[in-house]
Amino acid sequence: MKKNVGDLDSFLRITAGLSMLGIGIRKNCNPLIMLGSMKVAEGITRYCPLLSLMGISTEQRVI
């Protein structure tokens, strides 16, 4: 599995995912909990399946 999520994108996904998880748990909304946990996992693993399907990468390679 090749990384396709950059550093900033990763931090934003983790932050947004944790926010969604908190709101989903507070409101007992299962779809929001699932979406939040998916975003946190994408941020930690730095791999997004949707970006991979579209052939897009937000990771910047520095030589």
Image (tube, helix red, strand yellow):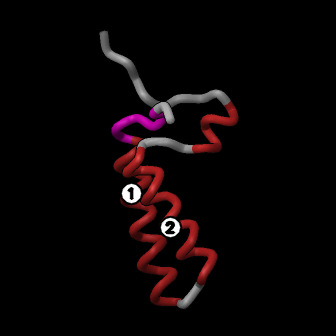
Mark 2 neighbour density, 10 Å: few (under 14) some (14–19) many (20 or more): many
Q: Quickly name the residue at label 2.
A: 36
Does residue 52 appear to the left or right of 5 in the view shown?
Answer: right
Magenta-highlighted residues: 3-8
Residue 1 in picture, x, y percent from top left: 50, 36
Residue sticking out furthest to the right: 54
As helix, strand or loop, the secondary structure at mark 2 comes to: helix
Residue 41 in picture, x, y percent from top left: 45, 57
Residue type at tag 2 = Gly
The residue at 54%/44% (across/down) is 48
Residue 31 in picture, x, y percent from top left: 63, 76
Please say whether residue 23 is one of the residues in the magenta stretch: no
Q: Is residue 14 above or below residue 9?
A: below
Does residue 5 appear to the left or right of 49 in the view shown?
Answer: left
Residue sticking out furthest to the top: 63
The residue at 48%/31% (across/down) is 2
Magenta stretch prevailing secondary structure = loop
Mark 1 neighbour density, 10 Å: few (under 14) some (14–19) many (20 or more): many
Q: CA distance from mark 1 to mark 2?
A: 9 Å
Q: Is residue 41 above or below residue 19?
A: above
Residue sticking out furthest to the front: 1
Q: Nearer the viewer, residue 9 or 37?
A: 37
Does residue 15 appear to the left or right of 35 in the view shown?
Answer: left
Location of the C terminus by quadrant is top left
Q: Quickly name the residue at label 1.
A: 14
Q: Nearer the viewer, residue 27 or 2?
A: 2
The residue at 32%/15% (across/down) is 62
Mark 1 or mark 2: whose residue is earlier in sequence = 1
Instruction: Kindly identify which numbered label has been placed on residue 30.
Output: none
Does residue 49 appear to the left or right of 21 in the view shown?
Answer: right
